[in-house]
Each structure stands twice: as structure tokens, then as C-alpha cells.
Image: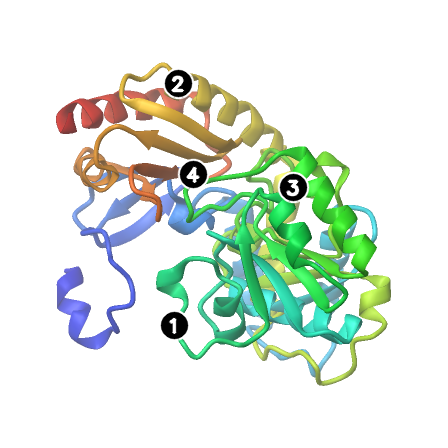
Amino acid sequence: MMNDLEPYLLRTYKRIPIDLARGEDVYVWDTAGRRYLDFYAGHAVASTGHCHPRVVKAIQEQAAKLLFYSNVAGLPLRVEAAKLLIQSAPPGFTHAFFANSGAEANEAALKMARKHTGRAAIVAMQGGFHGRTAGAMSVTGVERYRVPPLVPGTTLVPFGDLAAATAAVNDRTAAVILEPIQSMAGVKTASAEYFQGLRGLCDRHEALLIYDEVQTGIGRTGRLFFAPRHDVVPDLITLAKGIASGVPLSAVLVSKPIAERVSYGEHGATFGAGPLAMAAMKATLEVMREERLPDNARDTGAYLAEKLRGVRGVLEVRGLALMAGIKVEADAGAIQKHLLAQGVIVGTADEPGVLRLLPPLTLTRAHVDEFIPHLIGSLHHES
């Protein structure tokens, strides 16, 4: 059981009390054989559903050919996968850098911004989360994750407050970094005017705009990327989570002017862009396109939001498509536990009273109809 592993693992996560054995589509099974409806997807990672046959086949076939070699050697698959990612990206992005985690991608993006502008200062958002490595943690706006010593030079401003951003950004600013939807803060977003204002602000001061799309990317908000929603295209986009359906991988999407100023040795990740990860990413992107999963996320997400708004005890429904936050009257942690006892996995947020729903993008209306009675029962149980 899980507790038997505690002596061997650092206690860096609060674990839900189940031991998982396998998964398929929107369900996972524990070691006792019990099935769970997964509305969390392992932190928004299982984008194509658990063990999508096409992704599994791509990984299996690649593992039999070449399990690993680093970027020191060429790999045709790497070129094919990177080309597909760039072709799927918003206009203006020409290159990709691959690493292993969202924190690494954000670190690389911040380094690129500082190199490109010759400046050091960063403006980031209160409530934002960008990772736990030193640089990423320094631009994270959640106090409990900001463990000193921090990299100096970051100014935190309220998310959604253009006046505060205007006061903070100046000719010493290298970049503004933000999550277009703040997931851990409670699934909060901002107005079109805010994003447009940030773009204009960065342009006036020749600073770069970085979208952390670690969670909003790869179809979750009803499009493959949040950008260029509201006609705003950032200078850098960071990706991870669902980019390879669960194989560790992250990316930074880069425009040509920025790419031309990157020199050999400035960035690196031994395991970044390895054969298995590239096979998984290529298959993931192909499934996204051919099965129209971003469209499904939008349509099913709208159905989910409609159903949630009709539930007594739900105060507010936030987010886009299949990145949903539910503000509830009862204790969110208690509801999460009750749902787990009923065979449903959901997440919570740093904001008290908010449940996060980040299911696989293969979710259907039938799955929503399966989920809603469990939510109603859990809300009533805790009321």
C-alpha cells in the first residue's frame, strides 16, 4: 500500500489514499481492482486519455528501435515531431526548445528573455505558479512556494490589474510572465482588454511577453493553445503537462528573432527531446488533430459548465472548456475526499472552497452525466 512506500520517498506531495495499477481513457483502476472516474488526469497530463492506443503504439515501436540518445546526435523523429508542433503553433513561432518539466521550460524562457533584451527585471503575477526550481519559483506568486533565497529582480503585481502592470513595467523590464488561466490559484482568468493591454505594454517598453501554457496548452481550453485568443500572440510560450500524454516532456516555443540570439551551450536538457518523448508528442498531436480533441474539450466543457451551474451548492463555475474551477459552499477538501470514496478523482486549489476539474480531453457528455450525481451527493453530504 501507499503508506508502505513512505520510508523511501520524500514527502513532497500530499497523496490521495489510493494505489493505481492501470488506466484507460477517462478511468483508472487501483490495485484492488476498483475503477475511478478521473476528472484530474494526473495534474492535467493525460490529455489524450489514459493509455490512448495510438500513443501507446508509438512509444512501444520507438522503444524497440532506439530507447534513448541525447541531442548530441540527430534524430529524424525529433525533426518530424518538432515540425508538427511548430506547424500547430500560433503564427510567428519558428523554433522549439525541449526539456522535461514545466519549471525547466519557464527557466529557459526567462533566460532567453533576459538574453534577448539585455535586461534582468521580470514582472510576474500574484497567484501565478511557474514551478519549484529557483528561477521559476522566483516568479511564482503563491507565497507558500516562494522559498528563499529567490532570484532577485521580480516584481509581483495583481493578476488582471492592468494599471498595476503599467506601473511595474518599464525600460528595465525583460519580460512579463503569466498563466493565461491561473490554475492553482483557483482557475482564474482575465479580460480580453487585459491581455491586449499587456501586449501593448510590452511592445512600448520592448519587453517580451511570456505565456506559461503548461496547463492551458495542448487543447485544454478548447483550442490547441490559449494564444492567440483575444488576438494576442506572446513572444514565448512554455508547454508541458499534456504535450506527450504522460511521457515527461516540456517545450518553449520561440520566434525567429529570439532564436537567432540563442548561442550553443546556453540551454540544455540531457533527456529533453529523447526518442520516446518525441514519439509520444508526435502521436499526441496527431490524435489531437484527427480526433478533434480541442473541439471536444470546448463542446463537452460547455456541457459540463451548464450542468454545474444547475447544481445547488455550486456558487461559481470558472475557466474554459475542460479547465474548470468550481467554487462551492462546503469545504472543498472534504468534498474531494467524499468524491474519491465514491470513485471519482478531482483536484483542489490554493483558494479555499474551489475544486479543479482537469479531465482527459476525451471526456464525453456521458462521463459528465456520470459525474454530476456524485458531485451532488458529495455536496449534500457535506452541507
Residue 5 position by quadrant? bottom left
Residue type, mark 3 in image = Leu
N-term-proximal mark, 4 vs 3: 3
Instruction: Tell me which colouring the rendered structure shows.
Output: rainbow
How many neighbours does mark 4 have within 10 angstroms: few (below 14), some (14-19), or many (20 or more)?
A: many
Query: N-terminal of the two: label 1 or label 2?
Result: 1
Nearest to N terminus: mark 1 or mark 3 = 1
Q: Position of residue 326 (x, y in %)?
A: 37, 31
Q: Which residue is mark 3?
A: 224
The residues tagged by marks 4 and 3 sit, at their Cα atoms, a distance apart of: 16 Å
The residue at the point 46 percent across, 46 percent down is: 183
Residue nearer the viewer, 90 or 50: 90
The label nearer to you, 1 versus 3, is: 1
**Which residue lies under the disc numbered 2?**
309
Q: Are marks 1 and 4 in contact (CB under 8 Å)?
A: no
Above or below, 255 against 365 in this view is below
Instruction: Give the spatial CA distance, label 1 vs label 3.
Output: 33 Å
Identify the disc placed on residue 147. 1
Query: Could you tell me which quadrant the N terminus lies in?
Result: bottom left
Mark 2 vs mark 4: which is more N-terminal? 2
Q: Observer-nearest residue: 8 or 135? A: 135
Dot 1 amino acid type: Val
Q: Determine the CA span between mark 2 and mark 4.
A: 18 Å
**Residue at point 63%, 66% (across, down):** 122
Residue at image position (27%, 22%) is 313
The residue where tag 4 is placed is: 359
Q: Quadrant of the C terminus?
A: top left
Gap between marks 1 and 2 measured at Cα: 38 Å
Where disc 4 sits, the SS reads loop
Task: Give the distance between the C-alpha atoms of the residues marked 1 and 4, in whole angstroms.
Answer: 30 Å
Q: Which mark, by number, is residue 33?
A: none
